[in-house]
Image (tube, helix red, strand yellow):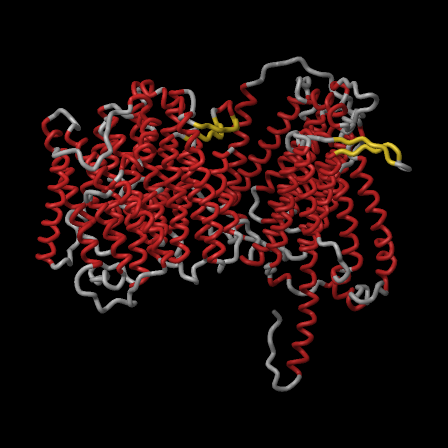
Amino acid sequence: MTLALILLLPFIGSICAALMPSNARNAEAWLAGAFTLASAALVILMYPQIKDEGVVRAGVAWIPQLGLDMQLRIDGFAWMFALLITGIGALVVVYARYYLAPADPVPRFFSFLLAFMGAMLGIVLSGNLIQMVVFWELTSFTSFMLIAYWYHRAEARRGAGMALTVTAAGGLCLLAAVLLIGEIVGSYDLDRVLEAGSLIRSHTWYPLILVLVLVGAFTKSAQFPFHFWLPHAMAAPTPVSAYLHSATMVKAGVFLLARLWPALAGTDLWFTLVCGAGLASLLIGAIAALFQRDIKAVLAYSTISHLGLITLLLGMNSPLALVAAVFHMMNHATFKASLFMAAGIVDHETGTRDLHRLRGLGRAMPVTATLAIVATAAMAGVPLLNGFLSKEMFFAETIFAGEEPWLRIGMPAIATLASVFSVAYSLRLGHRTFFGPPSQKLPRTPHDPNRWMLAPSALLVSACILVGILPARTIGPFLDAAARSLLGANVPEYSLAVWHGFTLPLVMSAMALAGGIVLYALLFRLRNGALAPAPLSRPLDGRRSFEVIMVALMRTADRLLNTFSTRRLQPQLALIVFAMVAIAGFTALENTTARDRVSLTPINGAFALLWAIGAACAIGAATQAKYHRLAALIMSGGAGLITCLTFAWFSAPDLALTQISVEVVTLVLMLLGLRWLPKRLEIDDPTRRTPRARVRRARDVVLAVVAGTGLASLAYAIMTRPRGEGIARFFMEHALPDSGGRNVVNVILVDFRGFDTMGEITVVGIVALAVYKILRRFRPAPESMPVPRAQLADAESGGRSDAESSLPRGFMLAPTVLARLLLPVAAVISIFFLVRGHNAPGGGFVGGLVMATAFIVQYMMSGTLWIESRMRIHPQYAIGLGLLSAGGAGCAAWLVSRNYLANITWHGHAPLIGEIHLSSTLVFDLGVYLLVVGATILILVALAHQSLRSHRQQVETSTTRVLAASPGASSSGPA
Amino acid sequence: MEVILTLGIGVLTASGVWLLLRPRTFQVIMGLSLLSYAVNLFIFCMGRLAIDVPPVITGDGRVDASQFADPVPQALVLTAIVIGFATTALFLVVILAARGMTGTDHVDGQERDS
């Protein structure tokens, strides 16, 4: 429960944060801080339990058949990361409160920050690999939103896009790897995968899995050759960089490598690939960092370098190196996050991050300078700070990396060389920014910021010092728990101490420090600190290859689309029909085994006559639809009527009722629509007689006849074979005992397959709203704008009622009165259909359509203006109420701990009325009813409302005429 | 009766498909409507034809399922009819808007070049 809460709190906070007003900076910070701290407190409270039990699990089965379960799992290693994520998260929240400008929309920032925190916690707390990948991709997405926070800046958009493309692509590779692992192990459960290490390593898929996992991890952790996105992601606000690009997201990659270390590590391939990438990143990052102008770019390349160091340690296949890697993950997070915060403060206070312009800030902002210099020293690996400890462990490991001579010499040499650069860039960062004569040309006069902006950085720096001086007392037990959870009983002997005597690693550290100072002094003397672009930056710049690949992909996609696709509808439809006929034909021809026939129902002459009419109607509609739309519409309605009678004939009263009501509503709808579809004139079109057109028509005739014959023969083949044992028996037998309904069709709709119906009415509701929205901005064809003759005649004869008088004069009087009388009667009938639907033909659909029809009749008789000035029921509310009612009836089942939409019935006795039988399906059906009423009316009224257009135009033209007649008035055309 | 219904389904399908492949929007909407009749009838006849035995239970609830018409295709078709209405409405509004915006009732929004 606690575990689930740790994960859920940030997400809940994210939703709350999104709902706040955009200028609520303090409230947002309090909210985000509270949720983060609560989550952090829960993490801390978990510690005793983890110490005792090792691993704490919680989970719910979701689809156990597929091995997909929500599985949360925390052990020492995950705990350490969870604390890091929530702890640094809380600090970043405080920092961001003072960093963001009043004009920045804060809800978006904190909402995505919290969502990112939740996603990150999801990665470290997942006990199921698929679930982990989902959270993995979620971090990519939220980090995209955070990097692009200032989306009006082009570089923010580009950086965010690049980060998303690279990391999400890596996530897909990871998903593939996880699926392969699941195939081998037979489970996605993390514990079982870790146990099956030897099985995975000996499998033939192991190289493939390893490469895919590594692509996922390296893209996330910005390792060579995927490192190029990280410097571009620096376009993000600095709190985001401090959080994502030092402490958390980029750590996800190395977290994954450490997590899967027991399962995947230990082979030569692992050593080559992981060490290779780590070594390359370590060196390239360190060298490039020395030559950057932007402070954040220095930090970004330094992050690449330090993550390279961690990757290198992970690749060494040695348990001791793994411990060092975990230790350095923590250390790097603390000093790098505080450095990013310092960079943000400098940027915030001086208006620039350019190392060529910044000089001597130490005097103006002493506190910031002190904090930043300590953190830089930790980054450089100065003794008594945490960076020194893990770096020394790293040096010690490089000495024992391998047996071969080139490894024995090469590895320590490269490690020392990279450290020389690391010391040099750290020195440059601290020296350029805070020492020397104060620079004069800064955009703002610098001074120390608000103490709350400094506090997060100060806390992190004191952690660096504490761990650096008293490692065994501070981080010791936690590191031990983390190592134990990764390595089990094989935790090697290691000692966390500042002083180990005069050892080779100490000599290497000293060499690195001295070399770094000399290197910086030389460069400073030579070029006065103004450094040219980094050597080797062009050939190793992944961004260029990234862009080349992206452009090539786009071009190929365009070309493929142009070759294999068309924007024209007719070929697409023809292909669909053709494919359908072909596929259905093939399958049907394969299964032509003769089975016992059933006796056919005897032919009834009346039915044959009905279908003679029906077929004539269909063919008539097909031929007339081009030029005589009304005729086609009527004939199509005729075919619909025959269909309806067929349903009634063959024992489907519900279908017949629904079909007839839908038929009526559709007809009204089409008639309303035809008003705005200009008439097609039957002219002699020469293009119709070209050979191509003839061939096309011939092809369509053939296709139509084949499709018709095919579907007909399929229907015949099925109807002449006996009915198989389907699911009908189940529904028939369970309808009355389980759902208390006699009309099985209705019982299926509202109970057995209620979820289906729920989805369906949602679609209907959405369609109604879409229709409403489209018509709000409707511009009809200009040819259809003039007021039709019938309307003009109405207006002249006074047949139309105006909105004020209660009854129209003239010939519309009698029909209007009758129609108004009809409304309550129709309402009663519709409710009758609704209520009896469970036991007899009827139901919510039919009832709703009847009610809607009665409303439409009112519109037709009294006119849109008259009705709309008196309408008190809004169809939108009916739609919403219907969905609430249906959904609520479904949720009600939870009250008695049953599944969603399960039927609950209640029997009771009421005075006067007698026996009462209430069922949640009736409420559900009521929801269907309300929604159908609302949606139908909304659609029809939105269309009918367009007729006011011509009224308005009439009024406007007459006013224009008056205006034009009066002198001096400029005539404005009708809108 | 099966033969008659078969022929009916065939004619409805053929007319529907023919209209579906025409270039004018109103033809396509009519085609979809005819085709949906055909498909609804097709699905409906999967439960075989039976006269005067609607799936409405009478008596005490002990039922022999084979004595009733199949309720499953009926339930499927019922939802299909209502969804059909909704899509027709949406399609109609879209073709009206397209006619207003493009000035033509060709399905592609422009007359064929050739």
Note whether residue B30 is visible.
no
State the count of labels.
0
Q: Position of residue A355 (x, y in %)?
A: 21, 58
Q: Where is residue A98 in the image (x, y as percent from the top left)?
A: 39, 58
Note whether residue A304 is visible.
yes
Q: Nearer the viewer, residue A939 or A352?
A: A352
Image position of A191 with respect to A345: above or below: above
Q: What residue is shown at x 61% (from left), y 69% (from top)?
A: A975
Q: Where is residue A17 in the image (x, y as percent from the top left)?
A: 50, 51
Q: What residue is shown at x 17% (from left), y 33% (from top)?
A: A500
**Image-quadrant location for residue B67:** top right
Q: What residue is shown at x 49% (from left), y 58% (from top)?
A: A24
Image position of A192 with respect to B77: above or below: above
Q: Nearer the viewer, residue A632 or A883?
A: A883
Image position of A797 with respect to B109: above or below: below
Q: Where is residue A893 in the image (x, y as percent from the top left)?
A: 68, 33
Q: Nearer the viewer, residue A743 or A752?
A: A752
**Image-quadrant location for residue A790:** bottom right
In the image, taking residue A634 as reference, residue A677 lies left or right, namely left
In the displayed image of the protein, which residue is found farthest to the bottom? A967
Q: Which of A62 and A492 is in front in this view?
A: A492
In the image, taking residue A663 as reference, residue A434 lies left or right, namely left
In the image, taking residue A970 as reference, residue A816 lies left or right, namely right
